[in-house]
Image (spheres, rainbow, N blue to C red):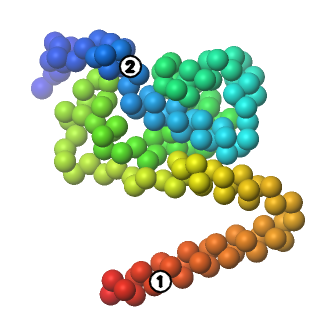
């Protein structure tokens, strides 16, 4: 069956904005992920902008979801920030996921899989990462890493044993 544009006439042509004019939550989510990665790498908006030939104001608008990020620009951000493009969509909860600007949420079913909240979105995790990056002695950093892995593994095994 061929789909025509009139089949989607119920979708407003607001260029991805909400009916009230606010940016789409998906664009806001992508902007937050952009900001998160920039902060993890300890880059300023100015520095990131210069890498792409943008002003810091443009980067700021992307980070707040005010300006939508095109596919090619998202690719550029991913390459510069050293992440896969999927990074920008990770941890999107169902409420945000269901607000596709072109009513695509009507296509998805109730069995949609959304990734759980990622710890990397929290301020706490950002502070821990920044503190870890300040450790100058590689041996200490390696020991701390191994301790964290060990504690996490121990907790996982304890939880598994309780549920058995």
Residue in the image at 68% along x and 20% along y = 56
Residue 67 location, x and y as percent? 50, 18
The answer to which quarter of the image holds residue 38 is top right
Q: Against 107, is 112 above or below?
A: below
Side of 152 relative to 94 (left or right):
right
Q: Which residue is mark 1?
A: 157
Residue 143 location, x and y as percent? 76, 74
Q: Is residue 51 visible?
A: no
Along the polypeptide, which appears first: circle 2 or circle 1?
Answer: 2
Residue in the image at 45% along x and 40% along y = 89
Which residue ends up furthest to the right in the rendered image?
A: 137
Q: Which residue is mark 2?
A: 22
Which residue ends up furthest to the left in the rendered image?
A: 1
Side of 48 relative to 23 (left or right):
right
In the picture, the quarter occupied by the N terminus is top left
Q: Against 82, is 10 above or below?
A: above
Q: Against 150, is 16 above or below?
A: above
Residue in the image at 77% along x and 70% along y = 142
Residue in the image at 38% along x and 19% along y = 22
């Amino acid at each position: 069956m061929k789909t025509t544009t009139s089949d989607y006439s119920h979708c407003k042509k607001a260029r991805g904005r909400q009916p009230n004019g606010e940016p789409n939550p998906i664009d806001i989510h992508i902007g937050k992920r952009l900001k998160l990665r920039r902060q993890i790498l300890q880059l300023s908006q100015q520095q990131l902008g210069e890498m792409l030939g943008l002003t810091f104001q443009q980067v700021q608008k992307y980070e707040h979801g005010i300006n939508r990020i095109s596919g090619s620009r998202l690719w550029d951000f991913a390459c510069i920030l050293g992440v896969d493009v999927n990074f920008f969509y990770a941890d999107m909860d169902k409420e945000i996921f269901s607000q596709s600007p072109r009513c695509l949420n009507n296509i998805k079913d109730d069995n949609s899989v959304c990734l759980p909240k990622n710890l990397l979105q929290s301020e706490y995790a950002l502070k821990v990462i920044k503190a870890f990056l300040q450790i100058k002695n590689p041996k200490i950093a390696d020991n701390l890493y191994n301790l964290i892995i060990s504690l996490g593994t121990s907790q996982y095994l304890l939880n598994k044993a309780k549920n058995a």
